[in-house]
Image (cartoon, rainbow, N blue to C red):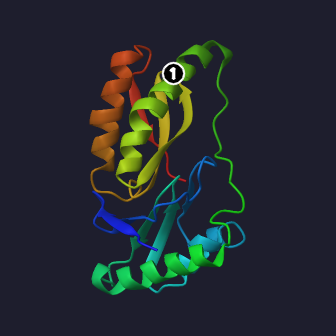
């Protein structure tokens, strides 16, 4: 099995491309700690078994792994490649259950605006963020403020706040005049 790797804008996160579906069309799964993966993802659990792994994100066709500062990628990368290869060879599922993301209730008068926001996020933002090894999740909209959560490589990336403010916020404000700001929501 050949697995490609790509750097991400977050130096603590590396993206692995196994050349096959990881979550497929089941969405994404973000595991910020080992206990979150237990019972939900055999793949994430096996990656957390490697010392130095602090986060795992599963995308449709990629895996992003975040490391602690104490370990180098030169040390971790071979161990992670072995764990990923072993997992796929075992035939075990990558993801057993998808967690629902909690969203704020949307006021009936905001439903059309929220539909526009979701469409823009799904078609313009999420593909770009996935290219960097992460995801962006809609959490709510109220009084002109869009609430979003960054996941995967984007969660701890030094440039994620700039991405939200200068990229996502400017684009949403351009296409959806009702949007006045974008706010990061931590899980």
Q: Is 160 placed above or below 91 here?
A: above
Position of residue 25 measured from the top left corner of the image (x, y, whole percent) = 61, 46
Q: Can residue 52 be seen in this view?
A: no
The residue sitting at 68% across, 53% down in the picture is: 99
Q: Can residue 125 be seen in this view?
A: yes
Position of residue 16 measured from the top left corner of the image (x, y, whole percent) = 41, 66
Which residue is nearer to you in this view: 181 or 82? 82
The residue sitting at 59% across, 51% down in the picture is: 24
Position of residue 173 measured from the top left corner of the image (x, y, whole percent) = 36, 21
For disc 1, the neighbor class at 10 Å (few under 14, some 14 to 19, many from 20) is few
Query: For residue 115, what is the image quadrant?
Result: top right
Q: In this view, does 3 lie to the left or right of 23?
A: left
Q: Is label 1 in a helix, a strand or a loop?
A: loop
Q: Most extreme residue toward the front, as rendered?
A: 1
Residue annotated with mark 1: 143
Position of residue 70 measured from the top left corner of the image (x, y, whole percent) = 33, 84
Q: Is 133 placed above or below 114 here?
A: below
Which residue is nearer to you in this view: 98 or 5? 5
Q: Is 92 placed above or below 76 here?
A: above
What number of labels is visible?
1
Which residue is nearer to you in this view: 82 or 54? 82
The residue sitting at 54% across, 28% down in the picture is: 141
Query: For residue 72, what is the image quadrant?
Result: bottom left
């Amino acid at each position: 099995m050949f697995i490609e790797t790509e750097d991400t804008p977050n130096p603590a996160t590396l993206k692995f491309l196994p050349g096959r579906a990881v979550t497929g069309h089941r969405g994404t799964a973000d595991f910020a700690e080992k206990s979150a993966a237990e019972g939900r993802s055999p793949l994430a659990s096996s990656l957390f078994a490697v010392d130095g792994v602090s986060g795992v994100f599963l995308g449709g066709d990629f895996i992003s792994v975040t490391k602690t500062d104490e370990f180098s990628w030169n040390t971790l990368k071979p161990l992670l490649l072995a764990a990923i290869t072993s997992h796929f060879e075992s035939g075990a599922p990558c993801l057993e259950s998808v967690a629902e993301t909690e969203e704020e209730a949307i006021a009936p008068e905001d439903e059309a605006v929220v539909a526009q926001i979701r469409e823009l996020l799904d078609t313009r933002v999420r593909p770009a963020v996935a290219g960097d090894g992460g995801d962006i999740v809609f959490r709510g909209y109220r009084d002109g403020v869009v609430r979003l959560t960054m996941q995967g490589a984007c969660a701890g990336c030094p440039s994620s706040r700039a991405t939200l403010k200068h990229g996502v916020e400017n684009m949403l404000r351009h296409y959806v005049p009702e949007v006045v700001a974008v706010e990061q929501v931590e899980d």
